[in-house]
Image (spheres, coloured by chain):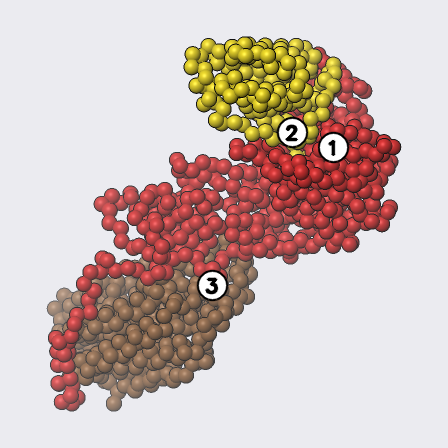
Chain colours: A red, B brown, C yellow
Amino acid sequence: MSVRDLLSPFSAWKNVLRDPVTIADPLNRDAAPRYRGFHQNDIAKCIGCGTCETICQNGAIDMLPVDSVATKIGDSGLRPRIDYGRCCWCALCVDICMTGSLTMSNEYKWVDPNPDNFRFTPGIDRKSWDSAELGYQRPEQHRLTETKRIAMQELEADERIDNFAEIVAGYTVAEAKLEADRCVSCGICVATCPTHMAIPEYIAAVRDGDYERGLKILYETNPFSQVCGRVCTRKCETSCASRHEGDAIAIRWLKRHITDQVPYERYREIVGDPLPPTGKKVAIIGAGPAGLTAAFDLARLGHQVTVFEAKGAGGGMTRYGIPEYRLPYEALDRDINLILSMGVEIHYNCRIGVDRTMDSLQQDHDAVVLAIGLQQGRQTRIPQSNHERVYRAVDLLHKITANEPFELPHCAVVIGGGNVAMDIARSLARMQKQQYGVVNITVTALEEQQHFMADADEIKEALEEGVLIRDRCGPQGCEVDTGGKLIGLKTWRVVSIFDEERRFAPKYDEQDEVVHACDTVIEAIGQFSDNSLLGELLTETLEWDRGRLKIDAAGRTSEPWLWSAGDCVKGPDVVSAVADGHRVAASIHQKLQEEDR
Amino acid sequence: MAYQPDRSQYPQRRPDGTLDIDLTSGKYLKLWQGPQHPGITGNMSVELTVCGDEVVAGKTHVGYLHRGFEKLMERRTFIQCFPIVCRICVPEPDFNEYCYAAAVEELAGITSPERANWIRTLILEMGRINSYMMYLGGQAGSLGQGVIGQWTTYARDLMLDRFEELTGARIYHMFILPGGVRDGLPEGFKQRMEETLKEIESILKDVYNVMYCNAVFKKRTVGIGYIDPQLLDSYGITGPTARAAGVAKDVRRDQPYLVYDQLDFEPITGKDSDIYTRADVRRRDLLMSVDLIRQILAKMPDSGELMAKLPNVLHWQIPRGETYIRGECSRGEYGYYLVTDGSGYPRRVNVRGPSYTHAVALLERLIVNINIADVAALMVSLHTYPPEIER
Amino acid sequence: MAEGSGYQQLKNLSTIAEILTVAIRFETTARDFYNAMQSKVSKRLRYLVDELASEEQQHMDLFTKLMQQDNLAEVLQQEIERPASDHKFSDCIHLPELGDAPDDQAILQYALMREHAAMEQYTALAKTAPEGPVKALFMLLANEETKHKNDLEKLYYEIVHSGGV
């Protein structure tokens, strides 16, 4: 203790001469640029995936429907409502947001006499900070989920060009786990999938390494899991939340991975036995995905199912349309055999209308399903296109699968930019490589290459395999020499394809004419269904809808005993056909049960 | 000379060891201090038994702030625990974030990037300054010196501004998450931080002149609240409280974490182990933090990763394991004991806050035979944050 | 085709009413042709001939309404200010033999060919007609046929070019 200790405290008086440090107007002090203030949500960007709701540790976020947002593919139609009575502004919702729509302003003052108002839907309930530029946004490098898809091992072009071996190797367990880990389980894909597979659940099974559980989940909605695991059009991946700021989850490959991991001998036991017989009989015409899915469901419900297939093997377009390098026959056979093991009887090489009549089917069964697919190829009918060396792609693909002989072209031009065009081009390329040693195939289509209907992967791989692509070419006629030999395809350059209403209406530049030299032209522009098996009488009795059989939402035709499903009524798509198969099976089952009451 | 309590007024003990206090005799009085009183000890209370104006027994009562954090975390995913932990200690929340993140990282086999470690260290030292500023105001306030609290609140506010621009929040920063930190330093941060540090140094000079060089403060604190160095280990005493007793315990040096091994510092110690010495050790420790921040800003890398690659946090499962992560906070050793069982949730989280050891067992021992008026000063000198006691 | 029988019939007509009367007769013939086809095609394709017949009916109605209008010249002037542009028909006009059991593609190609011919015929007439209401009328008729043809073309693509997926 000293004199200093007595005097020193009085130095505090010096503050009398100082300016005050108190902020005079604290209400108008701007918060820092990074400040985690009130939420903003870019409604147009938000897809309502609900990942914000999932990560919120205090249940402050609820996903709710809002009037101004419609539910559509890839958008749940829900938007996050935040309860500021629970929110702690940790911003994990902003960090995890899959689209980057959710951000925070740096606004922090909100006075309201009504406590309910503090529960609001950012972006929908207009707020003064909606357009604030400052505030917390997820920093570029700060990601709580992996954005890059795990690459799939595939055969290189030179390894695959001279054979029909499957290109895609399938994920290893480690790769699949990493890929499955990227999924945020939002489930938007489930609504998009035509057959509503429980995608997040089976991806969770991959994460857990519980493949038997995964397989069980797959078979609840899709008896063509091996097929769909390879060639599904995977609409799910187009609505995946991860695709907005990264790659979509490889849902299709994960599905395949599950089927790869479970030994086939275990399948039957995991899927389980059918219910006891009901004594009801159902006939199904067509052993494609739609017909066999309906057969699977109905057989499991205890009904006696007989399938009539015109061709020598089942699978429909998945066998006779899709080449082996995309879908090996063994994988397809495994799916079909499991379906048949449910007690489904099948007659191959039995064409209805020839070998048996519709009448006899109607008489012998309680219900009949027409699932004949789109087997006939559309023709362009351009001049000279009736030449014998002008083929339909589906016919050639059928010949390749069925091992029927045909004269392999030395130089072929394919018309069409869809997957069928790629399938035939790539199949012929392989055969040319095997037999002639060189690939000489040109694909022409109306669209620009980036707008081809074919998958981007198909186009990329076709190019790698040496297939030439000439886009924006409108076919105008086949060129035939004086000896009657096909020598080329004449095309005009396409100026535009769609009109203002986005309807298909190509315009051409007649001056820009090209003749693509070739000895064979293959038309792959579309397919239609051959309904002649119905017979004239039944055709007259049935109701039609713009050239297709008229069916209701459950797949019922205007005849009470006849249902129709799959490509022939819904257009071409494997997984949609599976969904359709389930739909008619459910409808038939309901009808048969009602009859019993 | 060691402090010798006057035992003349001390009640007799019954054979079972309890004190023989006969309230009807009129010799003793029960007096409740708290749960609200000016000692920043906030939501805890002490049940005093006094004889005249001398305390003969004190019993601590806690639980006014119990929110069950540890239990809450067992029902939350690893990432969801991150916004919770900071709430376990309001004035210095960052140690919770760091210890939790480090424990998760260790069990999950993740290494936070170098640059993130520098930023974490920076944040922890900034938090330490804030915590000490709050302490200084409380210590002076408990003895009636309101003005110190005004000054240190201003200084703390400047540091909160820096926190706001760096982390996006003033109190609960939620910036250190498992894997790293959210972001790097904002533009111009170093410059503004230097201005803040200069202001803090200037304020601390004033505080020194008015609070420490003050006959009243010395009269009230020198020789009061003495802690025998021999008690340190048996009572689990750490931090400035231990260092004021002459024992250079400091986790930053004893078991360097983050980037402390790359910083130049020596633990601050004192000799007398009383309230004044503890206050002085903390003041000097604060100045050391100012120096450490300068070192960090000078040495830290300006580019590099800020976050380690995490698995998808929504399904994050951590293999079976347990760990204890500790760090030196402004009050002593702060630790997180984390047990994982392979699921997506912590099996057990135990938070070791220094307040638990300091403010319950130690306080009950030290409170005996001191004057009622000194109780508040004694409590504050143990630098207690009650939420740590009742996680 | 452009200078076919219809051309000869119309070329010598000079009053608007006369021209319209003949135009209406053409549409009637076409409508009746499609209606007659009803019994020839399979029921599943009947929607197509129905649609084609009703399109022709719409033209008939339009022309009939025009004839009844007092300020006809004025209306014609307004109408032709928005000419429809012709896209060349892609799969090339290839006169189909519309046999006993035509399929949807053949019917559409036939209809397209018919509209195309009508369009060219009216265009040629408009070129040779003197400035005034008659020219305007031919241009209007050409325009109507072009619009109709464009609609058919879109339908053709939607039915035939389903993409070959």
Specify the label residue B178 is tagged with.
3
State left or right for residue C87 relative to residue A289: left
Q: Quadrant of residue B4?
A: bottom left
Q: Position of residue A209 (x, y in %)?
A: 62, 52
Residue drawn at x 27%, y 76% as measured from the top left? B200
Q: CA distance from mark 1 to mark 3?
A: 66 Å
Q: Secondary structure at mark 1?
A: strand
Name the residue tied to disc 2: C89
Which residue is situated farthest in the front direction here?
C130
Amino acid at dot 2: Phe
**Crowd tier of the residue under label 1, counting other residues whose Cα lies within 10 Å: few below 14, some 14–19, many 20 or above:** many
Name the residue tied to disc 1: A477
Q: Position of residue B191 (x, y in %)?
A: 34, 74
Amino acid at dot 3: Pro
Q: Is residue B171 visible?
A: no
State left or right for residue A323 relative to residue A235: right
State left or right for residue A478 relative to residue B145: right
Residue drawn at x 31%, y 46% as measured from the top left? A127
User: Contact, CB < 8 Å: mark 2 with mark 3?
Assistant: no
**Badge 1: chain ID:** A
